[in-house]
Amino acid sequence: MKLEKLKELNEKYRSVAKEISVLGTLNWPDMAKKEFLAEVEKGNYRLPEFDYTKKDLSEKKQRMQEVVDGCVDDNEPEVEFLRSNAESYVLALEMMEGVGTERVTEISKELYGSPYETLSGYKATSLAAAKYFLEVVASFKSEQEESESGEMTSQELASYIELNTNKVFRNNEINIVIDPNSSSRASVSSSRVKIRDNTLFKKYEARQLLHHEVFTHALCSINGAAQPVMTCMEFTSPRTTATQEGLAQFSELITGSIHLLRLKRIALRIVAIDMAIGGADLIDLFKFFRKHGDESEESYLSAMRIFRGGNPKGGIIFMKDAVYIKGMLEVYSFFLKSMRENNMNGLYALFSGKLTTGDVPLVNRMMEVGSVQMPKFLPMWFENIHHLTAILAFMQFATNLDDAA
């Protein structure tokens, strides 16, 4: 394909991708949470009622389909990569059009998988892995609460993020804003960290925000946008979600930023999907998360995630939470294999934009012809590759020690 045509398709893809907010379409109104939790405080369990605002997405879907139709040369890695991502967005748009119907269940399963799929490289399914992990967590008798003393104010968190981002980014790629009117405690885009004023953050939350959101999601977006041709790599398409979330969680693990309760919650959400498939409604899942130690608001949000695009009565299930354990194990296996084979180019490629581990061979081919370059930025933890190698080697040793007997 001629470079001019490739750039045209790339720009068309970008123009549509930046307009698509899957979760923004599927999420429930905030009023539903307020009404539900207000009733719970009174001792009542009453399902909230609301209607979705239907959106006409036909024009966006047509434009993205034009990208798919334009990607006709299977022999070029740029074309294959662009087509695969565009196809996953077309599916996502169909899911968004089907909000409130079984199409959400059907398409989200196609995009993200299900709890019953076997994990790549393992015999276990995501559901079996989640249940086993919960057994492992239960076997740890130590206190599972945050042991660090003290909390950070909004201003202290902003200073912490700024100090560390300045060590990686050179030209103020990330702006830090303290906003008293922010609806979320903290949010991160590829250009901004927004922190709600007059809010306290635990120290492990600060580290998670830095390594998960800034030094993975934002960093990969910035690297993707900086590519000479394939600037489409700035955006996380539905098909890249598992790898991107897996990489973010892997970064938490490798930097000592992850929290046992966070891992537990990931496993609980997979079990909750299974419950929802079996007929559970919002109240059932809310009680399930409360039983396992979550506060009321967190329990509501975890339950609501399972039914996004559906309704509190259940029956329509959004499968995205099935990707988290799958993605983390996929990234761990990728790092382990790459280091065994001394394939550092593959590891560098993983940070060049938003992609899957399976895309790395394509990206390496793109690097050979110059349509993709090595990542502009790398997270701090990746610089100490000897430390990372030692951790992975010991984990492999400990896991397979019986093989030496």
Image (spheres, grey):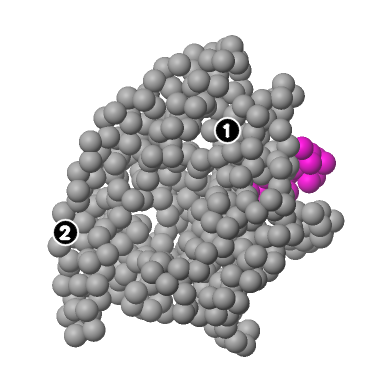
Q: Amino acid at mark 1?
A: Thr
| Residue 362 screen position, x and y as percent | 64, 28
Write down the residue under mark 2: 50
Q: Which residues fall within the magenta stretch?
A: 331-346
Residue 43 visible in the displayed image? yes
In this view, 116 is above or below 95: below
Q: How many marks?
A: 2
Quadrant assignment, res 139: bottom right
Q: Residue at x 23, y 41 (%)?
A: 55
Residue at the right extreme of this rendering: 386
Write down the residue under mark 1: 231
Residue 247 visible in the displayed image? no
Please tell me which of labels 1 and 2 falls first in the chain: 2
Q: Amino acid at mark 2?
A: Phe
In this view, 398 is above or below 352: below
| Residue 149 screen position, x and y as percent | 62, 88
Looking at the picture, tell me which residue is in the foreground, 106 or 19.
19
| Residue 42 screen position, x and y as percent | 19, 85
Which quarter shows the C terminus? bottom right
Q: Nearer the viewer, mark 1 or mark 2?
A: 1
Q: Residues within 10 Å of mark 2 (few under 14, many from 20)?
A: few
Which quarter shows the N terminus? top right
- Left or right: residue 354 versus residue 294 is right
| Residue 165 screen position, x and y as percent | 67, 60
> Residue 337 lies in magenta, yes or no?
yes
